[in-house]
Amino acid sequence: MKRLPENIQGVLFDLDGTLLDSAPDLYAALQRQCAEEGVKPPPYAPVREVVSRGARAVLRCAFDGRGEPAIEALLPRYLELYQSLMAQATRPFDGIDALLEAIEAQGLRWGIVTNKAGFLTDDLLQRIGWNNRAHAVVSGDTLAVKKPDPAPVLLACERAEVDPARCLFVGDDRRDVQAGNAAGLFTVAVSWGYLDGGDPHQWNADVVLDTPAGLLALLASASVIA
């Protein structure tokens, strides 16, 4: 494992599958759209697995046979259904609340870099009460590029006023690790998320952790600044 940065200033997180278990609401929206379209909904497990890839990947679980033009046509209605259900069953993963509270208590800054559309990200954070806690929020349409491009991660560092070399990036998808590595952050892959069917030990992350408590212990082992 690469050594942790000295005097850590902050931690950036992916959102869905890392901080929040949002798959139940995303699946519920797909179920409703399947009912509208007269299609049998797919099982939950394969849908949960692809959540990190976004709404189109979720739609393909049910409508892949119709082709990509049909997926694009179904997308606006799916996002409308999801927004109507958002935060009903979405919850922080076990241990995340304690982790964020500990990060804040240490005087560190934390932020979010997600490929989720900005209007959904902002609404979701408002509904769960995190909108005034994160020092930076960069969504999938904040820039012209998204993860695995490092630009959103670097923008989040700039907005949070942290040095990338003294910051961690935490995510449950290979693209999170790729973006964090390219931006020069210490990268943490988490196995509690959706993983997109992959093995986080194969993503070239600086460390792989199984629980939020593991990240808490990692931070406790490092020197930090208030």
Image (cartoon, rainbow, N blue to C red):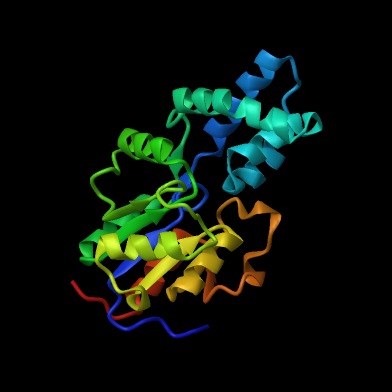
4 above or below 20? Answer: below
What residue is rendered at 40% in x and 70% in y? 168
When asked about the image quadrant of residue 27, the answer is: top right
Is 67 left or right of 194, judged from the image as shown?
Answer: right
Residue 167 in view: yes
What residue is rendered at 46% in x and 51% in y? 114
Is 161 left or right of 49, judged from the image as shown?
Answer: left
Q: Position of residue 30 (x, y in %)?
A: 62, 27
- Between 212 and 198, the one lying in front of the other is 198
Is 132 left or right of 193, judged from the image as shown?
Answer: left
What residue is rendered at 46% in x and 27% in y? 83
Residue 103 in view: no
Q: Position of residue 94 (x, y in %)?
A: 45, 49
When asked about the image quadrant of residue 105, the answer is: bottom left
Is 2 left or right of 54, judged from the image as shown?
Answer: left
Point out the residue furthest to the right here. Answer: 65
Q: Position of residue 150 (x, y in %)?
A: 47, 65
Q: How many marks?
A: 0
Q: Position of residue 179 (x, y in %)?
A: 51, 66
83 above or below 50? Answer: above
What residue is rendered at 71% in x and 31% in y? 69
- Between 139 and 11, the one lying in front of the other is 139
